[in-house]
């Protein structure tokens, strides 16, 4: 599993996550009426300014710094200058993104919260839409048994044997290359001692691998075998992962997520179908199924919903999952 060991990256992530949780808690406190209104407003402004500073100034600056520092031809003497130039370019794009939207207002200054929040909101909503679309496609593929490839332990063991055989062939051919190169280096030059050593090594290598080797051809074969071993290794890892997914799908949790995959897949197909119908026939979209279900439960079944309590438990569940 990939893990970031850079202390500065861990610190920045912890601060950003803590600020997000704090602002989320302030929304819950606003609904439940916890703390004084003036205190909630003060902490809300402090949290917003801190979050905007992290998102607009600190995070883009350090992302640009780490990207440029990983480029080999960038020298350390000009690294900071290039980082500042990259951050200024980001600020220009960040400011220009508000031109197509009704964000600018004479009531608010350039450094006001509204200017930053509006642009962060545009970028955030776009990214959330992309992530939501990716999750809607990726979730059924990773949780439904329909998309799981049947893999048996015998298949995995057979592929592992192929990997080991390929590695043995690579080692054998590299040994032949090394002996052939040594044979060229130890060819008889001047002196009887060199001739004696050459004859001894030649007698050993000739009996095993022949008198001459095509080194260039052997190197090409080794490169092909190394690429084959990489592909076989990746396939073996995929097989082990698929085996774990198959074992997980047999558990109660796996069956539950499999059912959710079918349910949400049908729901997404229905939403796509009804959205297409609304666009083609110029219909106005009606209430979504979730809101319609709550409406039926309240109006026809007499079930009372406390919105603040529902939001509180939902947000608490989300934080626990995170």
Image: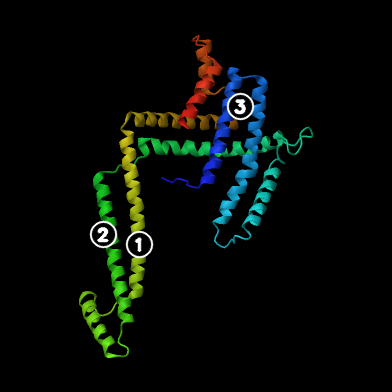
For mark 2, give the secondary structure. helix
For mark 1, give the secondary structure. helix
Q: Which residue is mark 1?
A: 226
Q: Which of marks 3 and 2 precedes in the sequence?
A: 2
Q: Nearer the viewer, residue 284 or 176?
A: 176
Q: Position of residue 60 (x, y in %)?
A: 61, 46
Q: Position of residue 311 (x, y in %)?
A: 54, 21
Gap between marks 1 and 3, in whole Å?
59 Å
Q: Nearer the viewer, residue 9 or 292?
A: 9
Seen in the image, is 140 located left or right of residue 66? left
Q: Which residue is mark 3?
A: 283
Q: Marks 1 and 2: CB-CB under 8 Å?
A: no
Gap between marks 2 and 3, in whole Å?
64 Å
For mark 3, give the secondary structure. loop
Gap between marks 1 and 2, in whole Å?
12 Å
Q: Which mark is residue 117?
A: none
Residue shown at the point (62%, 36%) measured from the top left? 51
Regarding residue 29, the answer to whether it shows in the image is yes
């Amino acid at each position: 599993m990939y893990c970031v060991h850079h202390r500065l990256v861990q610190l920045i992530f912890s601060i950003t996550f803590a600020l997000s949780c704090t602002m989320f808690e302030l929304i819950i406190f606003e609904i439940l009426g916890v703390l004084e209104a003036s205190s909630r407003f003060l902490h809300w402004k402090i949290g917003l300014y801190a979050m905007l500073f992290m998102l607009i100034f600190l995070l883009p600056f350090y992302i640009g710094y780490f990207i440029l520092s990983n480029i080999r031809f960038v020298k350390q003497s000009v690294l900071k200058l290039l980082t500042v130039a990259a951050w200024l370019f980001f600020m220009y794009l960040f400011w220009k993104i508000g031109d197509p939207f009704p964000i600018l207002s004479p009531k608010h200054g350039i450094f006001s919260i509204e200017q930053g929040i509006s642009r962060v909101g545009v970028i955030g909503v776009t990214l959330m839409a992309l992530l939501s679309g990716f999750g809607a496609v990726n979730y059924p593929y990773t949780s439904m048994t329909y998309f799981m490839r049947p893999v048996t332990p015998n298949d995995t063991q057979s592929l592992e044997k192929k990997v080991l055989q390929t590695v043995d062939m690579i080692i054998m051919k590299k040994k032949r290359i090394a002996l052939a190169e040594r044979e060229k280096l130890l060819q008889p030059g001047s002196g009887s001692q060199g001739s004696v050593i050459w004859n001894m090594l030649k007698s050993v290598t000739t009996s095993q691998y022949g008198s001459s080797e095509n080194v260039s051809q052997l190197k090409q074969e080794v490169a092909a075998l190394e690429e084959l071993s990489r592909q076989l290794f990746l396939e073996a890892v995929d097989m082990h992962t698929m085996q774990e997914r198959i074992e997980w799908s047999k558990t109660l949790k796996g069956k539950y997520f499999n059912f959710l995959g079918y349910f949400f897949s049908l729901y997404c197909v229905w939403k796509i179908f009804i959205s297409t119908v609304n666009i083609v026939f110029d219909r106005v979209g009606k209430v979504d199924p979730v809101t319609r279900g709550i409406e039926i439960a309240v109006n026809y079944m007499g079930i009372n919903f406390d919105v603040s309590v529902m939001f509180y438990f939902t947000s608490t569940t989300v934080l626990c999952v995170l």
